[in-house]
Amino acid sequence: MSAILLDGGIVHYEVIGRGRPIIFVHGWVGSWRYWIPALQTTSTNFRAYALDLWGFGDSAREEERYSLDKQVELIDRFLNEMGIGRVALVGHGLGGIVSLLYAARSPQVVDRVMAIDVPLEYNAISTRLRSSTPNELADWLVPRTPVHDPAREDASKTDSKAVMASFVDPNSLNIANRLYLGTTPVLLAYGQNDPAITVPNFDPMSMPELVHSIVLEGLGHFPMLDDTARFNRLLTDWTALASGESPRDLQLKEEWRRRIR
């Protein structure tokens, strides 16, 4: 287990591989652990990190650190502490929100973002997601299969106040406006059958040039586990794009053509 201290609080992370940095940030259920297949996939070309946000996994459980602003600040402090420069971010749910907010705040640092099952407005979040305990969320969103166990294993370590804190300020969750003003390439990926987050109905013609959305057919809230091979193919294609290249270029690949929305 690797950890750093930030203002006296432990931040747990794991890292493998060599190359350009990429950081994976978990969602409302689980911890860094369910990113292991993605870490292994990207580690052949990247220095791949996965960390636990405040109140999750093995990071510090201190209520004053749980706001979205503090979680975004955690990313900034982590990058500085680790001496990481320009970085790619992959965030799921809460981690996707934190990644997009950080990219809006520090576009000079973030090369690209993949945001998975991220609500672009407050009303896209199921009321059940906003009112359940971490264990209840795990029972609801995580299938009971061996491949999904890593998402379930650390649910009991989650401080429910850390989950609830992410919903306190609805204005912070109106992410769509930031996408239209941002300069960072963003790929939005959604599980078609995710019960927790409403898939946005984008008009492709009105979307910013650097923003693209893909719906993964038949998958739920954990597409990286529901179909690990398909998700990791998408992840590999996305990381192979040149710096600054729009993720819309992914639609040129026949494998994703039918999944573009």
Image (tube, helix red, strand yellow):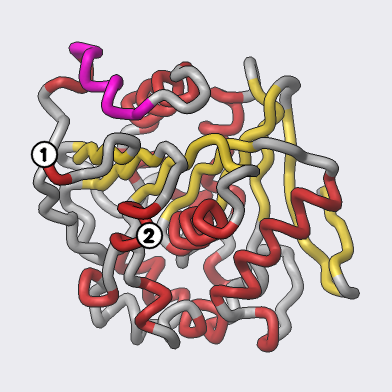
Look at the picture and state if 206 lies above or below 194. Answer: above
State the image coordinates of residue 126 (x, y, percent, origin top left): 24, 74
Q: Which residues are magenta?
A: 246-254
Q: Which residue is mark 2?
A: 178
Pointer 1 local density, CA inside 10 Å: few below 14, some 14–19, many at least 20: few
Q: Main secondary structure of the magenta part?
A: helix
Q: Nearer the viewer, residue 82 or 235?
A: 82
Look at the picture and state if 209 lies above or below 93. Answer: above
- Left or right of 172 on screen, residue 123: left
Residue 90 seen: yes
- Left or right of 105 on screen, residue 70: right
Q: Which residue is mark 1?
A: 205
Residue in the image at 26% along x and 47% along y: 190
Indicate whether residue 38 is drawn in magenta: no
Report, in whole angstroms, how far the alpha carbon at label 1 lies from the one at label 2: 18 Å
Tell me the amino acid under the disc marked 1: Met
Look at the picture and state if 238 lies above or below 102. Answer: above
State the image coordinates of residue 208 (x, y, percent, origin top left): 26, 42
Q: Quadrant of the C terminus?
A: top left
User: Residue 211, located in which quarter of the rendered image?
Assistant: top left
Tell me the amino acid under the disc marked 2: Arg
Query: Which element type, helix, strand or loop, lies under badge 2?
Result: helix
State the image coordinates of residue 46 (x, y, percent, origin top left): 65, 23
Residue in the image at 37% along x and 48% along y: 116
- Which label's residue is closer to the chain start, 1 or 2? 2
